[in-house]
Amino acid sequence: MKLAIFGGGQLGRMLALAALPLDVRCQFLDPVEAPCAAAAGRHIRGDYEDPAALEAFAQGADSATYEFENVPVAAVEHVARLIPAAPGAVSLACAQDRGHEKQLFEDLDIAVAPWAEVNDAGSLSQAAATVGLPAVLKTRRFGYDGKGQVVIRGADELDAAWDAVGAQPCVLEAFVPFQREVSMIGVRSREGEIRCYTLTENVHRDGILRRSTPVEGDALQPAAEAALSKVMRALDHVGVMAFEFFVAEGRLLANEIAPRVHNSGHWTIDGAVCSQFENHVRAVLDLPLGETALRQPCVMLNAIGSMPATAELAAIPGVRIHAYGKSARPGRKVGHVTVLGCSTSELRRRLAMLDALIDA
Ligand code: AMP
């Protein structure tokens, strides 16, 4: 079988690596010259808005999917007229707009921090009065890894914050003094079957994910599964979805969804029976879903900026290396490692050995 994937970044590369043992070949549409997924499948260089490129991309494929959420909705709709596409344009359009996303959470009775729409400098001061300060101003569209957002601590910072986000439609969200951040990753089949992974605890720095740890038996697992399932059903989502939450006063507060495989689920490659990548491939190609159970305690660490030397990582027992084949650049995700242990004490010892190599 053949799977056509919008985007040729590391998520596409890992989808293709998971697809190959199922005898599924992947082809990627990406406008850049040498995307890192090209090492794992066929790269079609073209623009997402070029109908000829979209047609070449869909040619011979059994299904289409996307690995990042800034694909133009019209491009997915175009390809969906040629071959089955999953997740659908509805999931994509919702995740592309923080306003729609938050409205959907509220409609589904999923708790969110106080928020308000902001369309101009005037509505920002109104929103600040409603939501309260400190708060976070976030662009409705095209934000990722903490980009497109500014923390506002006092009323004297409103104008500067509006300029800093580029004076565009935003949401203002109350600053959440969270105890921790967690995500729930799950997959939904075309028939509507849902399977969820172990709740994952995430640590961010400068808005970028650094470390993810699946926490077996977390008391919030059922609530997180329920919230994710509600959203997937409401959007008739097919494939993997990630739901990020803040935990404040012991309760989940919805942050955002990603209608795709997600960085906080990379541990599933080595730590779950069937990874998020394989399950996404299975779902979009209408194959039975795989087991999502955790196999072993593990922790995923992101390599940001540059990848440590392979030989040094490989010398640490229990470390699985995932380099994305990307050149070093400050703030860039260039790889990750997952460290596994038979017990939490063994895992801790191994993590301590990684301290000198990865600043996560
Ligand atoms: P986001 O792109 O919305 O996931 O934001 C990136 C990171 O910024 C989050 O994972 C949090 O660590 C932090 N952040 C975002 N929104 C808030 C908020 N309302 N309160 C506190 N921290 C936040």
Image: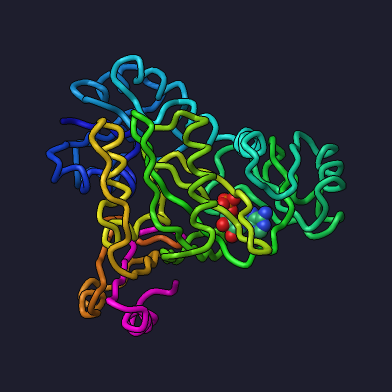
Name the quadrant where ligand 1 sits: bottom right
Q: Residue at x 34, y 85 (%)?
A: 349
Q: Which residue is drawn at 58% across and 65% down?
A: 180
Q: Range of the magenta residues?
A: 331-360
Confirm whether the magenta stretch covers residue 354.
Answer: yes
Q: Which residue is drawn at 18% across and 30% down?
A: 2
Query: Toward the viewer: 300 or 54?
Result: 300
State the colouring used for the structure image: rainbow
Task: Report whether 286 appears left or right of 238.
Answer: left
> Can you give x and y, in whole percent of width and height, for residue 287 in the image?
23, 34
Confirm whether the magenta stretch covers residue 359.
Answer: yes
Q: Can residue 140 be seen in this view?
A: no
Residue 143 appears in which quarter of the rendering?
A: top right
Query: Toward the viewer: 231 or 53?
Result: 231
Q: Which residue is drawn at 29% across and 72% down?
A: 340
> Can you give x and y, in whole percent of width and height, for residue 134 in the image?
78, 58
> Can you give x and y, in whole percent of width and height, for residue 318 in the image?
24, 74
Task: Report whether 336 appears left or right of 211.
Answer: left
Q: Is residue 307 above or below residue 78?
A: below
> Can you give x and y, in whole percent of width and height, for residue 31 in the image?
35, 34
Instruction: Give the quarter of the figure containing the C terminus.
Output: bottom left
Q: Is residue 144 visible?
A: yes
Task: Report whether 85 appears left or right of 315.
Answer: right
Query: Toward the viewer: 210 or 290?
Result: 290
Q: Residue furthest top?
A: 81
